[in-house]
Amino acid sequence: MQGYIEQNKEKFLNELLDLLRIPSVSADSKFKGDVRKAAEFVAEKIQVAGADLVEICETAGHPIVFGQKIIDETLPTVLVYGHYDVQPADPYELWNSPPFEPVVKDGKIYARGACDDKGQFYMHIKAFEAMMATNALPCNVKFMIEGEEEIGSDNLGIFVAANKDRLKADVILISDTAIIANDTPSIDVGLRGLSYLEVEVTGANRDLHSGVYGGAVANPINVLSKMIASLHDENNHITIPTFYDDVLDLTAEERAAMAQTPFNLDAYKEDLAIDEVYGETGYSTIERASIRPTLDVNGIWGGYIGEGAKTVLPSKAYAKISMRLVPNQQSDKITALFTKHFESIAPAGVQVKVRPHHGGEPYVTPTNSIEYLAAEKAMEEAFGKKPVPTRGGGSIPIVALFEKELQVKTVLMGFGLDSDAIHSPNEHYGLFNFYKGIETIPLFFKYYAEMAQ
Ligand code: BES
Ligand code: MN
Ligand code: MN
């Protein structure tokens, strides 16, 4: 196995670079054709690696690639999930090299999607190829690689509910999260949920002269700023009534264990070039970014933003707002709470509209399950160090749905680093991480197949 991987290192990397050249941005319809090209690329590679069935499944949006290799119906089945779509690369001018012209520099691959998630799911296709080529696939494997993760996976949710038989598996394996550091392996045992929405505040029926009307008519941007500012109190708690009611608090032991997680605050600050961290009183940085819910403005606009000055009182102001949720909060419920509260705090003189975007439920999984133990053993062997369980701050909405629809648990065996700049300019992925993943995945298969017998 190691021999095969060693001999094919260059080939594996070159294929990944080809995949990274396809700008499969799911959010922007301009890239629709490229998103499909990426699906076709993935389907072909799963086929060539040795699957006995591969299909590009159409949806109302971007296609889903499904593939499988069934060696024996009586053996366990691992379902590998990943996403071939990527976030928009904007702002382009902040990239040191073009986002869809990958370069390898200082042991890292720079491109949009290098880590999230092309570099990571591609490790699974190469690990599968290596297992097939060396006659070492110990159980059945299914692949489901989708093209809409970055826009909420709505169509995948429909696909999963309609294809329960086809997706039948004993465990779901995903590499789309991070480890603490290359010498400190970790496994995420949780993800946050998400409630994402857009708000619109309207004042007068048209933009007005800010001298003639200013001071006498509500300015939607002033009002929106004030409303947004009121959503946190002086301790950075969220002020929406009953927002925290369903939050499952960690026990004192769980918090103590979390406080032992290796974390270097100075390195964290240095990486981000900030002089201080910022957040909810009473919680550590790790807690704030994983086990606590949040409310953040992701974008805000309105009025005149062109060159020079224009004296105008805008008619409308907008913001995009995300709330990250933790067990046992529910996305729909939180969206409804937000909407009711936001409407209630609007002053007379403006109209408020709240439009929900997408959502997802939080996830948490135990560390004493067979799948966790198999991942732990695989990582320990590959890294020479036992991995630490961690809670991830990001969201992969389909994970909670897998459990609900398929009653199957997920192992989040990711290999990225927080510093890989996913969703940011100059996203990258370490060659070390790419190859370490390809080495670790067959070990997971081996130990999982043994333990699940
Ligand atoms: N891979 C990330 C999620 C992630 C990153 C989880 C790091 C844990 C650690 C995923 O591609 C992502 O960005 N998800 C979106 C979900 C959304 C668009 C529905 C997110 O978290 O913003
Ligand atoms: Mn991802
Ligand atoms: Mn992402």
Image: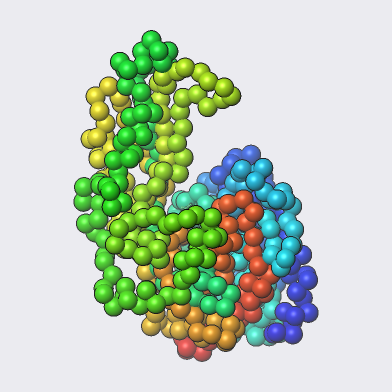
Q: Position of residue 218 (x, y in %)?
A: 32, 21
**Farthest residue, direction top:** 212
Instruction: Judge by depth and name the residue closer to the eye, 148 or 71.
Output: 148
Quarter-wise, where is residue 434 in the image? bottom right
Report the residue at 36% width, 16% height from top. Answer: 214
Q: Is residue 330 left or right of residue 376?
A: left
Total numbered badges shown on the rendered structure: 0
Report the residue at 57% width, 86% height from top. Answer: 384
Q: Is residue 5 left or right of residue 160?
A: right
- Colour setup of the view: rainbow
Report the residue at 74% width, 62% height from top. Answer: 104
Quarter-wise, where is residue 402 in the image? bottom left
Q: Position of residue 445 (x, y in %)?
A: 56, 82
User: Is there any visible trace of residue 313 in the rendered image?
Assistant: yes
**Farthest residue, direction front:** 275
Q: Position of residue 139 (x, y in %)?
A: 56, 82
Residue 301 to residue 428: above or below: above
User: Is there any visible trace of residue 25 in the rendered image?
Assistant: no
Report the residue at 58% width, 24% height from top. Answer: 307
Q: Position of residue 157 (x, y in %)?
A: 44, 56
Instruction: Judge by depth and name the residue closer to the eye, 297 or 367.
Output: 297
Instruction: Judge by depth and name the residue closer to the eye, 260 or 86.
Output: 260
Image quadrant for the N terminus?
bottom right
